[in-house]
Amino acid sequence: MKNRVILLGAIVWGLLGLLLLGVLVYFLVRPAGVNDFWEGIGVSNNWTEASLIREAQYSAAGLEAFGANAIAENVVVRLVPGDTIAVRQYGNPDRQEAFEADEGGGRLTISLRDSRKWWQNIFSFGTWNSRLEIDLPAGYGGDVALSSASGEILLPEDVKPVWGQVELRTVSGEIRAEAGLDGRRFTVSTTSGGLRLGPVTAESGFTAHSVSGSLRLTAVNTQGTASLRTTSGSIQAETLSCLEYDVHSISGGVSFTAGLSGQGNLKTTSGSIRVTGAALTGGVSVHSTSGSVQFGLTAGQGCELRMSSVSGSLRCEQPLLSDGGESRGNETAGRVGDGGPPLTISTTSGSIRVE
């Protein structure tokens, strides 16, 4: 009886597999005679080059906030002279609706919505290079909020925008601003896309979060707090200067290759931590569960150092003053230079080296 049930199950799964294979082949190479039927319900298996769907211009005079919300389109921003905002939508006019604009109260928001049914999204391949192009006046200094579900956000590569409060969000697309950004406050987040930013200056704070993508930063300078977080991606930056920082990666390394200034926390669960040229303005806590820590102090920087590891070696290249210092088992403490803010470094299964 048991063998019959197993045999019946194998037959059923085999038939389902053949059926799915047949459906896949059919949609990839289906007879031309039935294409009209599928096109009639909005399904297409042909990649098409994007064409212009809608173009519009808006005055930036008196504008305090600009926003754009895309679905599967890339959002591409350019800085142009003058005081006019130009928006161009490229895609497939037969399967995409034109964007809508909401104006009023010093705000302008461009929105795209997907009117296709679920079967159209499953069986249609889509449109090549679908995008929303935005020309913003170079002199515009208001707030900016850009989002795309499965598209990228691409900011100017050669000119650094100077905006107010900035929000950049994607679900599965990369965010890039190679020239950098200047503004009041920045919030940048992505779920499964990466982040690449040039030099950033933020007056009151900087936040960059990613679930399964890496953060690649050049230089971040803010008078407020900085929060950098990833779940399964690394965090890499040349420099970070801020009042207070919170840097955390669960499954990825953390590195600052040219400077880290401020006070705060550095933490990884299964990645290493590398810091060069750290200037401590307050207490700093560094912890790695399954990774090594290499922490380099800037020249002349003193601190009250405490290192501990469950199963890793401890090494300090700086002289540790014996007065008040202690060393027992896997824990070492002492004063570096003339002393200063507390620096606490701990690992569970990684080595620690202070330079």
Image (tube, grey):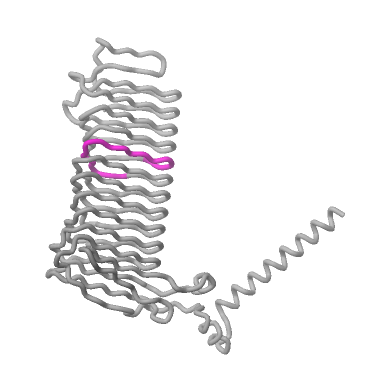
Q: Can you tell which quarter of the image residue 11 is in?
A: bottom right
Q: Residue at x 22, y 73 (%)?
A: 86
Q: Can you tell which quarter of the image residue 78 is in?
A: bottom left
Q: Quadrant of the C terminus?
A: top left
Magenta span: 236-253
Verify whether residue 106 appears in magenta: no
Q: Quadrant of the N terminus?
A: bottom right
Query: Residue 142 or 28: which is nearer the viewer?
Result: 142
Residue 288 horizontal/vertical position (percent): 40, 32
Q: Residue at x 19, y 56 (%)?
A: 163
Q: Residue at x 25, y 54 (%)?
A: 166
Query: Residue 237 or 210: which is nearer the viewer?
Result: 210
Residue that lies at the very extreme toward the bottom in this rendered image: 33
Query: Residue 270 or 151: which is nearer the viewer?
Result: 151
Residue 201 horizontal/vertical position (percent): 19, 48
State left or right for residue 244 relative to residue 90: left
